[in-house]
Amino acid sequence: EVAEPVMKTKVITFASYKIALEFSGVDAEKLRKSFQKLIALPELLMEKKTKRAVRMIDIHPWFEKAEPIFEENLLELKAILPAGQMETINPNCFTAILEQYVQLKPDLDHICRTGIFNEQMQSFH
């Protein structure tokens, strides 16, 4: 049996993610300090490629709102990112920013989308 959709897909604006980044030989304190260093910066610029162009975007607001958990060799993030027709930011941006700004490259990343929301943060499901 198929359920009727709660909302139309065009109203999707945000998506939530659980992101696990595994590192070799990086303790929780180094991960915490690196994350705090990023939050302290005024902006976190990265390239965003679209079908028509490449432009720079500032993902600092999304980094700042992420909920980090620091463990030995592991950084877990709960994050909400734009995921709509007007703007979409790939959750891999967290990995890219860590590499670009603090030279931390995870050995393994696991990204799981945990929700889809409209502009008022009402769940799509």
Image: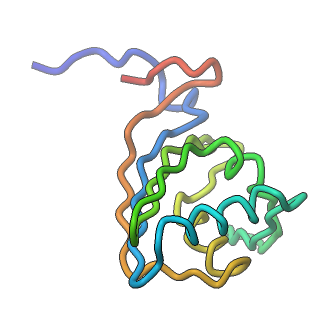
**Point 82% across, 70% down: residue:** 55
Identify the image quadrant of residue 81.
top right
Q: In the displayed structure, does residue 122 sit left or right of residue 58?
A: left
In the rendered image, the residue lying farthest to the left is: 1
Residue at left offset 47%, top offset 78%:
26
* Left or right of residue 12, residue 116 in this image: left
Q: Is residue 11 above or below residue 17?
A: above
Residue furthest toward the right? 42
Residue 120: x %, y % from top left: 63, 18
Q: Which residue does the image show at 39% across and 15% down from the upper left?
A: 6
The residue located at (62%, 80%) in the rendering is 99
- Where's residue 80, x and y in %? 57, 41
Foreground of the two, 13 or 44: 44
Give the image location of residue 47, x and y in percent: 75, 73
Which scheme is used to colour this image of the protein? rainbow
In the rendered structure, the answer to whether residue 62 lies left or right of residue 27 reads right
Image quadrant occupied by the N terminus: top left
- Front-most of residues 31 and 45: 31
Which residue is more in the foreground, 23 or 13?
23
Marks counted in the figure total 0
Check the picture and name the quadrant holding the C terminus.
top left
Percent coordinates x, y for residue 25 in the rendering = 42, 84
Splitting the image into 4 quarters, where does residue 54 fall?
Answer: bottom right
Q: Which of 91/86 is in front?
A: 91
